[in-house]
Image (tube, helix red, strand yellow):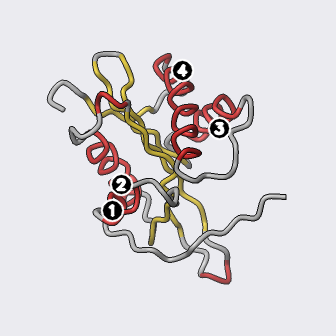
């Protein structure tokens, strides 16, 4: 990971963010392969990126792994409020994590995720939630390495 830089994307007009569109599509293909039932909409990656750009550093954070000016990974999360009946406190939501195949196993995922978790702490969240695809071999152990424990089992019925 010595040549990889971990940076926070704070400018919605940063041209490097366009590199995330094919990565997001690949992320969803991988998640589908490992059990995700929902399908990415035809323009889903663009919709996701536009939404991320709109809330950067206010409601959401996007952390990039760069090899020069080439994005080789990203992770992101957002802050939301729990319902009033659960205390209405700030809750972090770790939403996505992706690293290109050739940059996996080098600590890139951990470095980006640590940077995201620092932001959650700065934002004063009381807990952080994440969802992982049921059959991905490393997702649960990776999340557990950050102190996450299984709270819910999510079920889906396709109609």
Q: Nearer the viewer, residue 48 or 122?
A: 48
Q: Residue 65: x percent and y percent? A: 33, 31
Q: Evaluate if marks 2 and 4 touch, with contact meaning CB atoms under 8 Å apart.
A: no
Q: CA distance from mark 3 to mark 4?
A: 13 Å
Q: Which comes sooner in the sequence, label 3 or label 1? A: 3
Residues tagged 4 and 1 counted as in contact (Cβ below 8 A):
no
Tell me if label 3 and label 4 are in contact, CB under 8 Å: no
Looking at the image, residue 21 sits to the left or right of residue 9; the answer is: right
Label 2 – label 4 distance at C-alpha: 27 Å
> What residue sits 56% from the left and 49% below the top?
59
User: Going from the N terminus, do you reach mark 4 or mark 1 first?
Assistant: 4
Circles 1 and 2: CB atoms closer than 8 Å: yes
Q: Residue at x 64, y 37 (%)?
A: 48
Which residue position holds label 3? 51
**Foreground disc of the pair 2, 4:** 2
Q: Residue at x 33, y 57 (%)?
A: 142
Q: Would you identify the image quadrant in which residue 153 lies?
A: bottom right
Res. 18 mark: 4
Q: Is 112 positioned to the left or the right of 105 in the image?
A: right
User: Which of the pair 24/136 is nearer the observer?
Assistant: 136
Q: Of 36 and 21, which appears nearest the observer?
A: 36
Picture quarter with the C terminus: bottom right
Give the percent coordinates (x, y) of residue 132.
Answer: 49, 58
Tag shown at residue 138: 2
Which residue corresponds to mark 1? 141
């Amino acid at each position: 990971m010595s040549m990889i830089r971990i940076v926070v994307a704070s400018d919605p007009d940063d041209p490097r963010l366009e590199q995330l569109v094919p990565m997001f599509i690949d992320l969803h293909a991988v998640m589908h392969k490992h059990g995700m039932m929902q399908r990415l909409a035809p323009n889903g990656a663009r919709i996701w990126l536009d939404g991320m750009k709109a809330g950067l550093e206010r409601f959401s954070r996007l952390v990039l792994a760069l090899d020069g000016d080439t994005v080789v990974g990203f992770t992101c999360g957002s802050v939301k409020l729990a319902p009033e009946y659960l205390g209405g406190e700030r809750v972090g939501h770790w939403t996505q994590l992706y690293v290109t195949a050739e940059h996996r196993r080098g600590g890139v995922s951990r470095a980006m995720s640590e940077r995201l978790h620092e932001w959650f702490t700065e934002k004063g969240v009381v807990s952080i939630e994440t969802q992982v695809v049921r059959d991905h071999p490393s997702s649960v152990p990776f999340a557990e390495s950050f102190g996450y424990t299984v709270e819910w089992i999510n079920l889906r019925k396709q109609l």
